[in-house]
Image (cartoon, helix red, strand yellow):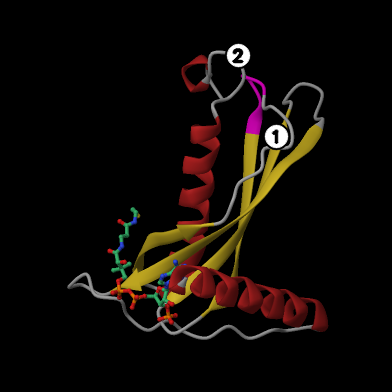
Amino acid sequence: MQPGHANNHGNVHGGWIMKLADEAGALACMRHAQHRVVTIAIDQMVFRQPIQIGDLIILTAEVTYAGRTSLEAEVQVIAENPISGDRVHTNTAYLVYVALDDNGNATQVPGLTAENPSEEERMQEAEKRQAHRLAQKRK
Ligand SMILES: CC(C)(COP(=O)(O)OP(=O)(O)OC[C@H]1O[C@@H](n2cnc3c(N)ncnc32)[C@H](O)[C@@H]1OP(=O)(O)O)[C@@H](O)C(=O)NCCC(=O)NCCS
């Protein structure tokens, strides 16, 4: 993170983190879908710690849900001080994308397969989150 990424307090502007998280989640979903994707929903983002200018931001994105045309990515954000090596987990975000075909219409995505009980559990949690989002949308 460079000085151009700072907010008025001299830390990293949250908007940059949101942008990076959105891009990381999109790339994970594009790899899975093998189509371009657009963001349709972002769950709340909680910034647990400020990130310092000069820190390295490490984003880890995993696909946690695949519906018919939609996908959820879980994005972990970690800030590392490149000199001390100290790492802080600053936030976890859940973002939903829709895969698009060449005409810009929503298109079907491959399903997800859990390879162990932990992944199965994560997929079930993601299904609940998506059901909650759609219920909120209907209200
Ligand atoms: C993405 C877009 C093409 C989808 O249009 P659509 O096909 O008419 O949308 P649908 O209502 O059929 O929904 C498509 C999928 O999104 C899901 N979805 C819709 N609203 C949602 C919400 N609020 N939260 C989570 N998922 C949602 C639907 O459940 C569906 O998933 P499924 O096929 O797996 O069941 C359209 O909404 C769009 O262009 N949005 C703008 C995207 C954008 O500009 N993003 C910012 C820049 S990347």
Rendered-image quarter of ligand 1: bottom left
Q: Is mark 1 within 8 Å of ligand 1?
A: no
Q: Quadrant of residue 88?
A: top right
Q: Quadrant of the N terminus?
A: top right
Would you name the residue on which mark 1 appears?
Answer: 79
Could you tell me if the residues under marks 2 and 1 are in contact, i.e. CB atoms within 8 Å? no
Would you name the residue on which mark 2 appears?
Answer: 9
The span picked out in magenta is 52-56
Q: Residue 50: x percent and y percent?
A: 69, 27
Whichever of callouts 2 and 1 sits on the residue coming sooner in the sequence is 2
Q: Residue at x 69, y 84 (%)?
A: 114
Q: Is residue 12 above or below residue 42?
A: above
Between tags 2 and 1, which lies in front? 2
Which secondary structure dominates the residues rendered in magenta? loop
3D distance between C-alphas at marks 2 and 1:
17 Å
Q: Residue 10: x percent and y percent?
A: 60, 13
